[in-house]
Image: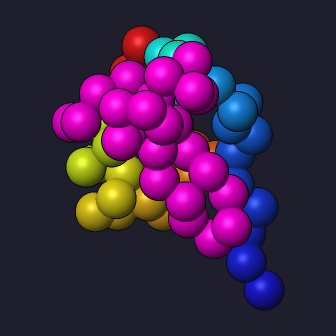
């Protein structure tokens, strides 16, 4: 059984908490699909951090940096 993750809005960067336009993020290659859910990012750094360890940022105890 998996632990439910924290709620993340469709336009929220799960790493820093910044709100981004999903279409713009996709166009810039700043979107990742994980476990059937698309996540968008403010920049490459946040995207790479998430890609390398998504469970850290999906954990309910994670507090975004912003």
Nearest the eye: 14 or 40: 40
Q: Is residue 44 magenta?
A: yes
Residue at the spot x=37%, y=51% of the render?
50
Left or right: 8 as drawn, with respect to 20 = right
For residue 35, above or below residue 30: below
Q: Is residue 64 above or below residue 47?
A: above
Q: Is residue 54 magenta?
A: no
Q: Which residue is at the front of the view, 62 or 8?
A: 8
Where's residue 61, x and y in %? 57, 44
Q: Which residues are magenta?
A: 21-45
Q: Visible in this render: residue 56?
A: no
Q: Quadrant of the N terminus?
A: bottom right
Q: Quadrant of residue 21?
A: top right
Point 47% across, 53% down: residue: 32
Image position, residue 24 (x, y; %)? 48, 22
Q: Residue furthest front?
A: 27
Q: Residue at x 70, y 33 (%)?
A: 10
- Most distant residue in the bottom direction: 1
Residue occupying the point 35% across, 32% down: 28
Estimate the x, y position of residue 58 in percent, counting from the top left: 56, 52
Quadrant where the C terminus is found in the figure = top left
**Taking the image as drawn, is residue 45 in sight?**
yes
In the image, 20 versus 3, the foreground residue is 20
């Amino acid at each position: 059984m998996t632990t439910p993750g924290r709620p993340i809005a469709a336009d929220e960067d799960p790493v820093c908490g910044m709100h981004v336009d999903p279409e713009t993020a996709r166009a810039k290659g700043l979107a990742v699909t994980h476990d059937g859910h698309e996540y968008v990012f403010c920049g490459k750094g946040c995207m790479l951090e998430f890609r390398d360890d998504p469970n850290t940022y999906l954990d309910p105890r994670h507090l975004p940096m912003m």
